[in-house]
Amino acid sequence: MDVDRLTDWLERYFAAWRSNDGGDVAELFSADATYSYGPFREAAIGRDAIVERWVGGGEPADFTYRYEALAIVADRGIAHWAVGFADPSSSGSRVEMDGILVLTFDEAGLCTEHLEWYATRQVEAPAS
């Protein structure tokens, strides 16, 4: 893994988040990948389970993102990320998430282990 490959993967990751397209999501992960949503939530195991859980949330409206690759260690990449999107359950508010990813990749550049820690808050959407 190197910074260019990690940056490319992260761009595709956030594009898949925006599109919520199962094919886009599947292209990111190995068949036997593990996707952990934090230390106290059940992980999705296997590409099919990852895709199913991912697309179940629906396409986010007014999606924004940013990230910074922090480190590369052998086959692992570490990044800081933040996203925002319209809150689907509350008109006039947004969800903001900020977190850390620790990602392990195989030789083909597919993610085999996805570990994330994040915080979420709901904020009033800015006036248009």
Image (cartoon, grey):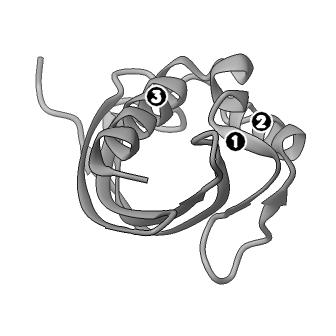
Quarter of the image for the C terminus: give it. Answer: top left
Indicate the amino acid at tag 1. Phe
Q: Residue at x 31, y 54 (%)?
A: 81
Q: Secondary structure at mark 3?
A: helix
Name the N-terminal-most of marks 2 and 1. Answer: 1
Q: Check contact, mark 1 vs mark 3: CB within 8 A.
A: no
Q: Nearer the viewer, mark 2 or mark 1?
A: 1
Q: Which residue is mark 2?
A: 51
In the picture, measured across the screen, residue 28 lies left or right of residue 93, that is right
Cα separation between marks 1 and 3? 11 Å
Q: Amino acid at mark 3?
A: Arg
On the image, the x and y values in percent for residue 75 come to 51, 63
Q: Position of residue 43 (x, y in %)?
A: 77, 66
Q: Residues within 10 Å of mark 1 (few under 14, many from 20)?
A: many
Look at the picture and state if 55 lies above or below 99. above
From the image, tell me which residue sits under label 1. Answer: 29
Three-letter amino acid code of the residue under disc 2: Val
Q: In this view of the protein, which residue sits in the foreground, 112 or 85? A: 112
Quote the CA–CA distance across marks 2 and 1. 9 Å
Q: Earlier in the sequence, mark 1 or mark 3?
A: 3
Name the secondary structure under disc 2: helix
Percent of width and height locating residue 70: 24, 64
Distance, label 3 to label 2, CA atoms, is 14 Å
Q: Residues within 10 Å of mark 3 (few under 14, many from 20)?
A: some
Residue at (88, 38) in percent of width and height: 48
| Among the 4 quarters of the image, the one containing residue 50 | top right
In front: 108, or 120? Answer: 108
The residue singled out by tag 3 in the image is 12
Q: Position of residue 68 (x, y in %)?
A: 22, 53
